[in-house]
Amino acid sequence: MNSIEIRDLVLRFGKTTVLQDLDLDIEQGEFLVLLGSSGCGKSTLLNCIAGLLEVSEGQIFINGRNVTWEEPKDRGIGMVFQSYALYPQMTVKGNLSFGLKNAGASKEEIEKRIKNASQMLQIENLLQRKPAELSGGQRQRVAIGRALVRDADVFLFDEPLSNLDAKLRTELRVELKQLHKRLQNTMIYVTHDQIEAMTLADRIAIMKNGFIQQLDSPATIYNRPKNKFVAGFIGSPAMNFLEGTLDCTGEPHFVVGEAKIPLAGYEFSQNLEGKTQSSFGIRPEHIVYGEEAQKAPFNAKVTVDVFEPMGSDTQVWAHVEGQNFRFRIDGRDKIANGDEMLIGFDPACASIFHGETEERI
């Protein structure tokens, strides 16, 4: 049985439609990430599931029960916000127990749940402190603990790590993954950070303008993006796009400027004939250089325009047939602006998108 089912969901604010005819099934125990840029509708969808926004049309089911018009407290959810939302006058223990007291839980049950949650999140020694005495990471652990003590069926996370520094984000990301592994509860996580999405998710729903562009595993979204938007959104640095013509009059190949890229090994998603204006996408990490480039199915000489040392690797900016192109090289390799390099790649790693529809070919 699916943990959450969303059917024909529509949300309007006045004359503005934010979510349109949205359908989504989330499996029991799944970690689903809603990923997209600001304003795409991901937090809005989360708030609809939580009951914090009243839907205009459609239905929401949690564990087979229609909760479309139920209050948030009756939906069996635990929610963690970006802003922590802790009561400053209460201790950590008071924050953890507040919801349980209001729900009428016994003193013994409250103590038991607080003990389990605090051990799981390693905050036992913080129970008598107030939020002002805690670091950002500790506050977020308390916020997660407040959701855990509710013993909810579904946990909702609204960009919970955005206020933390990079090191803490990495640490808490690992802790969240371990937490999900232990609990096996359904978790829905909203973020604009693709690294969080790729590392945490069982499946990712990439959103744009209130629509889900692709719902798939991280590996599938990375290797076989459904359209050009998804391809450009996932990956850091972003995918290279070469604008040109897909020629299927004989052996399929892609023409960009004077260059012809053979497409042996490329898996087409649709059958095309003749010539089609298209975008050829290849990720910077799939580019090889030097001796490896000589053996690649396609290679080209480029001139280094700019390079960015990143420590373990260096990002290089260049041009292929007059179009911007970037790739990675080993951070130990010496390089200078104006250097000529031979680069190459296997077109089997590429993604080709239709010039008009921007759908994968």
Image (cartoon, rainbow, N blue to C red):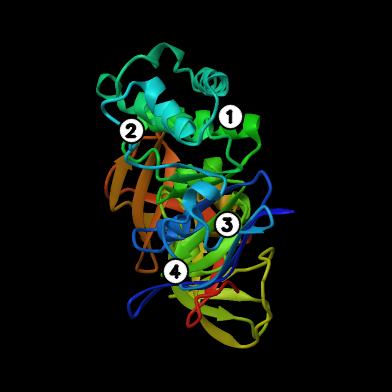
Q: Considering the image in quadrants, where does the N terminus appear?
A: bottom right
Helix, strand or loop for disc 1: helix
Q: Where 193 sits versus 216, above or below?
A: above
Q: What numbered label is drawn on residue 65?
A: none
Q: With respect to residue 37, does 354 lie above or below? A: below
Residue at the disc numbered 2: 86
- Residue 200: image quadrant is top right
Badge 3 density bin: few <14, some 14–19, many ≥20, Cα 10 Å: many
* Amino acid type at image mark 1: Gln
2 or 1: tag closer to the N-terminus = 2
Work out whether residue 291 can be spotted. Answer: no
Front residue of 128 and 350? 128
Give the amino acid type for the residue marked by disc 3 in the picture: Ile
- Residue 261: percent from the left, percent from the top? 56, 68
Residue 124 location in percent, x, y? 46, 14
In 3D space, how far apart are the residues under numbered discs 1 and 4 (Cα atoms)?
A: 31 Å
How far, Cα to Cα, is label 3 from label 4? 19 Å
Find residue 210 and name its label. Answer: 4
Cα–Cα span, label 2 and label 1: 24 Å
- In whole angstroms, how far apart are the C-alphas of marks 4 and 2? 30 Å
Q: Residue furthest bottom?
A: 274
Spatial CA span between label 1 and label 3: 23 Å
Q: Which mark lies nearer to you, 4 or 2? A: 2
Viewer-nearest residue: 22 or 114:
114
Which residue, given by chain and number where applicable, does mark 1 sit on? 178
Q: Residues within 10 Å of mark 4 (few under 14, many from 20)?
A: many
Question: Can you tell which of label 3 and label 2 is closer to the viewer?
Answer: 2
Which residue type does callout 2 highlight? Leu
Q: Which residue is mark 3?
A: 221
